[in-house]
Image: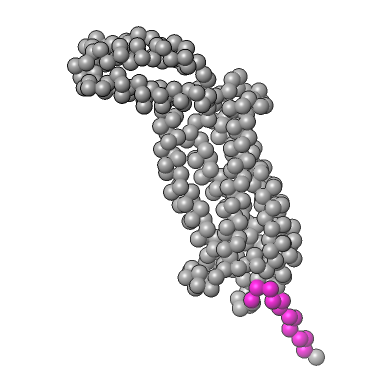
Amino acid sequence: MKGDEDAPQRVYQRVRGFDDVASVRKPQFNDAKTVAIVFVTPNSAPQDEKTAQLVHRLRDDVVPAATKGSPAAVYVSGLNAAFIDIADRIIQRLPLFLLYIIGVTFIVLAMAFRSIVISLTAAIATILSAFIGFGVLTLVIQKGYGMGLTGLDRTGPIETFVPPIAFAILFGLSMDYMVFLASRIREEHVHGLNTTEAVEHGIAAIGRVIVAAAIIMATVFSAFILTSDRISKEFGLLLAVAILTDALVVKMTLIPAFMTLMGEKSWYIPRWLDRLLPKLTIEPPHEGEAGLEPGVERRPEPSEA
């Protein structure tokens, strides 16, 4: 308090009259009378917007008014305040976070498949899967729908660090599935099939592998829901739903349908970008077919008489 022992009392007096405060305790001092704590309990639930508004009101109005002209330093702390601070920091850094993950993925996929259509489709589709996972997590954890299936007995806020960490994990797994799928389709296309036929043959060849891998990963993450830790439950529910959605709905349904509709345009890449990006081959052509152009069938060699 730096010489101002009355600052905690002024904070206490100002908070006492708030309608959105259930209770406020008198300042609790340490033995040296240098630090005091004022406990404030809101009327609203932790995940309620009113609780966040109370935190901002304490910081923006109460504390400046109570310490005006005083050397005392007052801080608003607690779980809710900490989560608000973390959320604000994450939101500030979110554009850079998304730009890095999506940007690197776009460049690598464009190098591998020589197509900006596939690269953009992969990034957008993964974001769609993540949104569905976030939506289910919000319905269960914050709104309480089906909460009993997770072993929780009350709603609460979603920890602010859960979505970005889970999104990074999901993005990595989703790109694995995309590489499995697109590389197999591209291989069929390079070896002579048109895009529609290549999609059909590619799905038939690799579809079971993608579905099996997604079910395995979803089962592993679902096991986290059985733990007693709330954060582990959130990670497990979010990732299990998002991965199944990404594999079964996005990778096995939406992306093949989109590529079929786009046809040969699925492999579009600007010439300047094609020259700029280094060549990266995921599925090398078979021996003797290195020079085969996409969409061109190899004619059988004439038999000798």
Q: Is 298 colored magenta in this rendering?
A: yes
Q: Relative to 142, is 207 on the left or the right?
A: right
Taking the spot 53% from the left edge, 30% from the top edge, the residue there is 158
Q: Relative to 32, is 167 on the left or the right?
A: right
Segment tinted magenta in the rendering:
293-304
Quadrant placement of the N terminus:
top left
Give percent across and percent down for residue 106: 52, 58
Q: Is residue 237 above or below residue 207?
A: above
Number of marks in picture: 0
Q: Is 100 colored magenta in this rendering?
A: no
- Spot the residue most to the right: 305
Quadrant placement of the C terminus:
bottom right
- Spot the residue most to the bottom: 305
The answer to whether residue 254 is visible is yes
Give percent across and percent down for residue 113: 58, 65
Taking the spot 61% from the left edge, 46% from the top edge, the residue there is 128
Visual colour scheme: one colour
Q: Is residue 250 above or below residue 157?
A: below
Give percent across and percent down for residue 11: 33, 15
Taking the spot 42% from the left edge, 44% from the top edge, the residue there is 93
Mostly what secondary structure, the magenta segment?
A: loop
Q: Is residue 172 above or below residue 236?
A: below
Q: Relative to 101, is 178 on the left or the right?
A: right
Give percent across and percent down for residue 168: 51, 45
The foreground one among 151 and 300 is 151
- Spot the residue most to the left: 3
Q: Is residue 187 above or below residue 28?
A: below
The answer to whether residue 176 is visible is no
